[in-house]
Image (cartoon, rainbow, N blue to C red):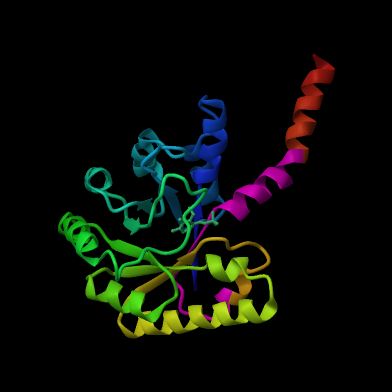
Amino acid sequence: MAKLGVNVDHVATVRQARGINEPDPVTAAALAELAGAEGITVHLREDRRHIQDRDVEILRQTVKTRLNLEMAATDEMVGIALKVQPDMVTLVPEKREELTTEGGLDVVRYRPILKKHIDLLRQGGLVVSLFVDPDIEQIKMAHRLGVEYVEIHTGTYCEARRSEDRKAELAKIGTAIRAGRKLGLGINAGHGLNYQNVQAVVALGGIEEYNIGHSIISRAVLVGLERAVREMAALVREG
Ligand code: PXP
């Protein structure tokens, strides 16, 4: 059965918008685990726009399931990962100007630089995953680079508007899963998955873990709003 890893970056985004200490992604991670999440994912970006170093350090001590650290393949991030020792490191592409991770890492193009960082991470005892598009050449190269896992980028499938495009993207994901498994890779998937589009991917089978963030945090805001307003209204009335 597939597992759910919850990405709590968006809780940190709300906190950073105010520059104060709430809502705390560490608390959100604990609640996600209590609700059945089998992993917690955070993306420590180079510009620290949401998750902070302090979050990663505390999560390492408090996460009871598995901590997956998403990061760019840079010397700074490799140093942090070796120090923090997450249960998995997922290498992702990162450009400062993007709103979120846009597409998979081009492991064919960036093979030499990735090789250096992957080797350092693996020598440090870490399990490494590469976030890649559902493309056979990328999967084959990930395997050649010696990683244990790939995370298949589902964003293009999620963004497809026409049903034939969605079907074509889903077929690519299915082919990538089969190719990866044949090579002995563990397969994770994520990006853009929501309450409407995840089941078709689950039906493909073969995926170990889904890393899902935005749709879960968005839903939490809405399903939690009524209670939050009721509680504040009571305080205002009684006050
Ligand atoms: N997987 C990776 C590699 C990501 O970069 C992200 C976004 O941070 C996710 C999964 C989660 O994507 P979403 O927030 O769209 O669920």
Q: Quadrant of residue 230?
A: top right
Q: Is residue 205 above or below residue 239?
A: below
**Residue nearer the viewer, 164 or 150:** 164
Q: Which residue is painted at 36% across and 79% down in the image?
A: 180
Picture coordinates of residue 197 (x, y %)? 64, 69
**Residue nearer the viewer, 197 or 93:** 93
Picture coordinates of residue 12 (x, y %)? 51, 38
Magenta-span inclusion, residue 75:
no
Q: Which residue is painted at 48% across and 49% down in the image?
A: 98
218 sits to left or right of 89:
right
Q: How many marks do you count on the picture?
A: 0
Q: Which residues are magenta?
A: 201-225
Q: Is residue 31 above or below residue 90?
A: above
Q: Tell me the quarter of the image containing the C terminus.
A: top right
- Residue closest to the far right: 237
Q: Quadrant of residue 169?
A: bottom right
**Residue nearer the viewer, 153 or 128:** 153
Q: Which residue is painted at 52% across and 48% down in the image?
A: 99
**Residue nearer the viewer, 129 or 229:** 129
Q: Is residue 104 above or below residue 82?
A: below
Q: Is residue 203 above or below residue 52?
A: below
Picture coordinates of residue 141 (x, y %)? 28, 75
Magenta-span inclusion, residue 223:
yes
146 sits to left or right of 230:
left
